[in-house]
């Protein structure tokens, strides 16, 4: 089948893209509003784009209303300029999912999910103590595109639990961390445990020898 995205409605485009752009890493973002109220929410439209400087990108859609109302995370980042990406692993996946619930503003996702917080080193929003790694970010720029926002954040500090770091690189022991990826649909995820596939990269010289 072929789909002309200039002719089909946005919800159908969404269903196609989330089924094809997979698996996606999950950014469990902690942010503060102007009064210091903490918010935690997961986003799977997320990846890194540059390393010098270190830039990550998050796609945050507006709330599903007739008027343009940003989600708390996007509003907090625009107004305070800081946020933390907590890496989602198997052991906190269910708590992460709870944070996706649209709770009333006076209710704390962090408390309801059973998370605790730890002060960050360079930004005001705290990281989640149960997460094994976290990226402290400052807003680089925000692009408003249609009913969404593309937030680019500059990573200013990275914290990783010692057991997952080989100082020689430094390298991350990704196989041991057991991160969780997002698939299609509201409840579909994928494990990375025992799922690594190794395909050695071939140099041009080696490729020529094989021919």
Image: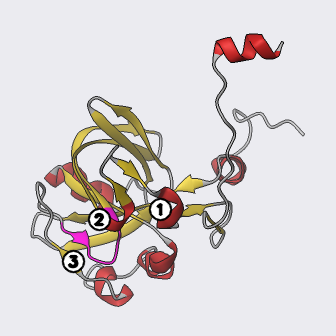
Left or right, 68 with respect to 194, comes to: left
Distance of label 2 from label 3 (alpha carbons): 18 Å
Residue farthest to the right, as pictured = 1
- Residue 55: where, in percent of width, then height? 32, 37
Give the SS element for disc 2: helix
Left or right, 48 with respect to 32, comes to: right
The residue at which mark 3 appears reads as: 117
- Residue 126: where, in percent of width, then height? 18, 68
Residue 49's place in the image compared with 132, above or below, is: above
Tell me the residue at 64%/30% (across/down).
201
Left or right, 24 with respect to 4, comes to: left
Q: How crowded is mark 3: few (under 14 residues within 10 Å), some or many (20 or more)?
A: some
The residue at which mark 2 appears reads as: 162
Q: In the image, which disc is placed on residue 65?
A: 1
Residue 143's place in the image compared with 62, above or below, is: above
| Circle 2 or circle 3, nearest the eye | 2
Left or right, 187 with respect to 119, comes to: right
- Residue 116: where, in percent of width, then height? 25, 83
Q: Quadrant of residue 125?
A: bottom left
Tell me the residue at 65%/60% (across/down).
183
Magenta stretch, residue numbers: 126-133
């Amino acid at each position: 089948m072929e789909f002309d995205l200039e002719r089909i409605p946005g919800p159908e485009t969404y269903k196609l893209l989330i089924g094809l752009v997979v698996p996606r890493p999950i950014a469990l973002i902690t942010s503060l509003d102007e009064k210091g109220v903490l918010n935690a929410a997961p986003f799977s439209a997320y990846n890194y784009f540059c390393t010098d400087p270190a830039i990550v990108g998050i796609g945050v859609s507006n709330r599903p209303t007739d008027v343009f109302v940003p989600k708390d995370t996007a509003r907090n980042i625009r107004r305070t300029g800081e946020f933390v990406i907590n890496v989602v692993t198997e052991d906190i996946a269910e708590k992460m999912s709870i944070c996706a619930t649209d709770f009333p503003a006076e209710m704390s996702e962090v408390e309801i999910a059973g998370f605790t917080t730890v002060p960050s080193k360079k930004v005001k929003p705290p990281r989640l103590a149960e997460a094994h790694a976290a990226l402290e970010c400052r807003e680089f720029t925000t692009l408003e595109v249609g009913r969404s926002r593309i937030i680019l954040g500059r990573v200013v500090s990275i914290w990783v639990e010692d057991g997952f770091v080989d100082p020689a690189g430094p390298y991350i022991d990704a196989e041991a961390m057991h991160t969780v990826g997002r698939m299609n649909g509201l409840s579909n995820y994928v494990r990375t445990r025992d799922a690594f596939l190794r395909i050695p990269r071939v140099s041009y010289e080696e490729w020529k020898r094989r021919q």
